[in-house]
Image (cartoon, rainbow, N blue to C red):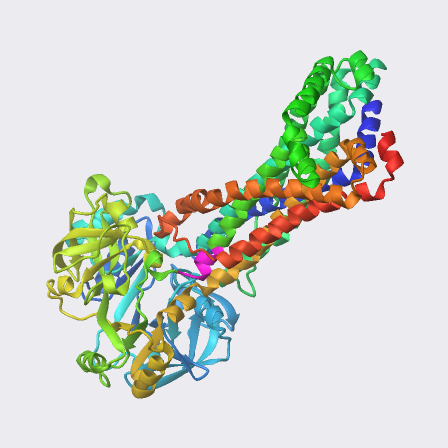
Amino acid sequence: MYPVFLLCLSNLKKRKIQNGIIAIIIMLSTLLLSTAVVVMNNTGEVFTDVHNKVNGSHEILYFENGLYDPDRVHDWWAEQKGVTASSLFHYRSLSTFTYQGKEVSNINLYMMDSGTAPNQTKVDQLIFAQGTKTEVPSEGTTWIPTSLAYSKAISVGDEIGVKTDTGQLKLKVSALVVDIPFSQPFSITARIWLNTNDYAHSMAVNGQVDKAIMGLRFDNLNDQGVYWTRFEAAFGAPFLESLTDFQGISSFYLITGKILSFIMILLATIMIMIALYTIGFTISDAILSSYKTIGIVRSSGLSAKKVISVYVLQYFLLAFISIIPGVLLSYPFSKKIITMSLSYLKTNDYLLSINFTIYGILVGISVLTLIGFISLLFSLKSRTIQPAQAIRYGMSETQLAKSAKRLIGSRLSHKWLDRIPVTVAVAIRGLVKNRGGSFLMALITALTTAVLVTGVIFMSSISSLAPPQWGFDNADISLEILNQSELGADELKQVLSEDQRVGNISFSKGLYGVIPIDLEMKSENNTAGVYINSIGGNLDELGLTNIAGRNPQGKNEISIGTRVSKALNKGVGESIDVYVQGRKGTYTISGVYQAITNSSISARMTLEAMDKLQLDSNPGNPLVLLNLNSNVSKDQFIQDFSKKYGTAIYIASQETLIKETFSQAVAVLIMPMLTMGLFIIIVVFSITFSINRIYVKKESKTYGIYKTIGMSSNRIRVSIAFSTLILVAIGVIIGVPIGIYIFPVLLNTILSNYGIVQFPINYDFSMLFFTLFVMVIAVVWGSWIASKMIQKTSLRLLISE
C-alpha cells in the first residue's frame, strides 16, 4: 500500500495547478448542492416549526356578508373533536393608511378588535418580534405584522394614521408581531391590532355590522373534508363565506426557497457532471501521458489493481479535501437565504435555526461516492496496459497503428488547410486532434450558456413583470374611491368621461364566491372558494389574457383560474355553478387564465354577470381602471386627481402597484442569483484553463516545431484562443435554445402550485448579451493564460521534448 500512497502523492504534486482547479470545481459544486438541499428542506421545516409553535391555523374563515351568525359557527367548530378553533375576532376593513406624511395604499387593512386577551387564543398565537409584550395594545397604540412593518420600514415607536368614520385616528406602533396567516412575503393584507376602546370609538360606529374572523387547526389535516361534510349537514349548505386554506397560508412563505433551491440544484447538478467528466477526462489523459511510466511500474511488480488504486485514492483524497470546505461554507450561505426568504418570521428572541448537519453530511458523502465511482470507472483503462508495449512504444500496438493511420489520413485529407491563414489552420488542427478536450469544452460552454440564459431570463421576467402574463390587468391607472361621502361612483364616472385624456373607463368589484365540486373529484373539501373579479367594460381593452379561450362577455360567461379549472376538472365551453353571498348563478366557462395573485384560485366576469345575482350589498370601495390616450403623462394625471380629490381617492399607476408587490421578490433573489452566476463563470474559466494546459503540455513538441518555422509564441497562443472561441460559439448556439425553451418548462412544475403554468418570459437582451460576453471573455481568457507557458519555454527545450 505504501508504493500506492507514494505514487498518489507524486501525482498530486506533479499536477498542482490541474488538481487545484478540480478541487475548486468540486468545492463550488458541493457548496451549491449542499446549500440547495439545506434551503429546500429547511424552508419548509422552519415554517412548520414556527407554525406549530404558535398553533397555527390550517384554515381561516371570514364572515363578511352576513350569511352566518359568526358566534354560532364558532361554537359549532369549538365543539368538534379533533379541531381547535381560535377566538372569534371582529374587524373592519380599510384600504389605506398614512405613514411619515405619505399615504400608503394598495393594501387591505383588517382593523382588529383585540378583545381582552388576544394572546390567549388557542390558534394563531402572536409572536412579538419587537416591542414590549403586553396582554392588549394600550389605547392610542397598535400592533402590526412584520410583513407590513418590514416592507414599509416601520419601527416600534413610529406613528401611523388611518382615516375612519370619525376622522383621522393616529396610532403609535407599540409592537411588531409575527401573525402567521398575515405575515407572508408579498402579502398586501395585514391585521392591525387595536385596543378595544379605540376600536369601539373609532371603528364600530353608525350601527354598521362588524366583520368577523376565526382560525381552525385540525389534529389531522387529512380529515378536513370529513368535518366540512358535517358542517354542510349541520348548516344545510357548504360554507358560503370567504375561506383561506393551508396552502394559501403557507405557499408564499415557501415560494422563494423552492425557486432558489430548484435553480441551485439544477446548477449544482450541471457543475458536478462537469466536474465528474473533467475528472474522467483528466484520468484518461494522465493514463495516456504516463503510459510508459505505468508500464515500467507494472514490470517492477505493481499489480493492475494497485495502479487503479493510485488514481482512485488520488481523486478520493482531492474530493475529501474539497468537499469539507464546500459543505462548511454552505452553512452561512444557506442560512442567509433562509433568513432572507423567511425574514418575516424572525424575532429578537426567536432566531431561525436550521437543520444543517445531516443534510451537509449526506451531500458530502454523495459527492464523494460519485467521484470515487467515476475515478474507478475511468482508471480501469490502466488494466489493459501491457508493460512491454508501454515501455517500447509509449502506447499499445493498436493505438500505435491507429496513430499512424491518422497521420497518413491527415496528410491526404487536410490539404485544404494550406489555403487558409496559418493561425486558423493551427486552431482547426488542434480541435481535430484534441477531440476529447474539444467535446468537453463545447459541452461545458453549452451547459454554462443554458444556465446563464435561464438565470438572466428568470430575473428579467421577475423584475420586469409583463402584467397580463402574470394575471394582472394592463390598465395605465388604478383609482380607488376611499370616501364615497365626498366622491360618489357616478360623479367620478361623469368626471372621467368628460376628461379628454382618458381613453376608456372600467369599474371593477371584487367578491368572494364558492364553486361546488363534484363528490367524485373532491380531495379535501367539496367546495372551491374563489376570489371573483367583476369588471365593467371590455376586458380585452384592459389587457387581460387567457391561456385558453377568451375573456367573458355578457351576463352568462365566466373565465376561471388554472387551479380552479384543475380542481373542477372543467375547461372552456363547460358550465359551472357559482354562489356569491348565498345567491346561485350558472355560467359558461369562456376562458382559463393564469395569475400569481390568489394563486389562480379566482375567476373573472363582467359586471353584468355579477348584477344578475341581485346581491344585497355592493362590495367595498369602487375601483376604477383607466387607460389614457397616447402622449398623456401618467404622472401628471395622477398629480392632478390627487390634488383635486385629496384623501377621498387613492390613485396610482399600474407599474407602481406591481412594483410594491414584487420588489421584495427581486430583493431576495438577486444576491443568490448573482452569486451562482459568479460560481459558474469561475468553473468554466477553471476548466478551460485546465483543458488547455493539458493540451499545451501534450503538444509542446509540435509547438516547438511551429516556432522553428517562424511562428511566434503569441501567434500560437492566438490560434489556441481562436480554437477555444470556435468551441464557445458552438456551445452558445446549442445552449441558448436550451436556456430559452427547456429550463423554463422545468420552472413551470414549481410555479404551477402558485397559479403559473406557462412561465412568462421577458427578454432583457442587453443583460443577456452582457452575461454571455462575460462568459466568452472568461473562457477565452482561460485558454490564453493556459498557453502562456509557450511564451516562457525555450525553443531548445520544446524541440528536445
Does residue 551 sit above or below 286 in this rendering? below
Residue 696 visible within the image: yes
Q: Residue 336: image x %, image y %?
A: 58, 57
- The magenta stretch is 459-465
Residue name at image x 83 percent, y 14 percent: 299
Residue 745 location, quadrant: top left
Main SS, magenta region, reads helix
User: Is residue 52 shown left or right of residue 223?
Assistant: right
User: Is residue 245 shown left or right of residue 48?
Assistant: left
Residue 109 location, quadrant: bottom left
Q: Residue 766: image x %, image y %?
A: 51, 59
Does residue 299 sit above or below 127 in this rendering? above
Q: Which quadrant: the C terminus?
A: top right
Q: Residue 484: image x %, image y %?
A: 23, 81
Residue name at image x 42 percent, y 68 percent: 660
Q: Residue furthest right?
A: 796
Magenta stretch encompasses residue 739: no
User: Is residue 526 shown left or right of residue 334?
Assistant: left
Q: Which quadrant: the N terminus?
A: top right
Asked whether 441 or 793 is in front, the reply is 793
Q: How many marks?
A: 0
Does residue 400 sit above or below 11 in this rendering? above
Does residue 347 sit above or below 406 in this rendering? below
Q: Residue 36: image x %, image y %?
A: 55, 46
Residue 37 visible within the image: no
Asked whether 447 or 247 is in front, the reply is 447
Residue 746 location, quadrant: top left
Residue name at image x 40 percent, y 46 percent: 748
Asked whether 487 or 774 is in front, the reply is 774
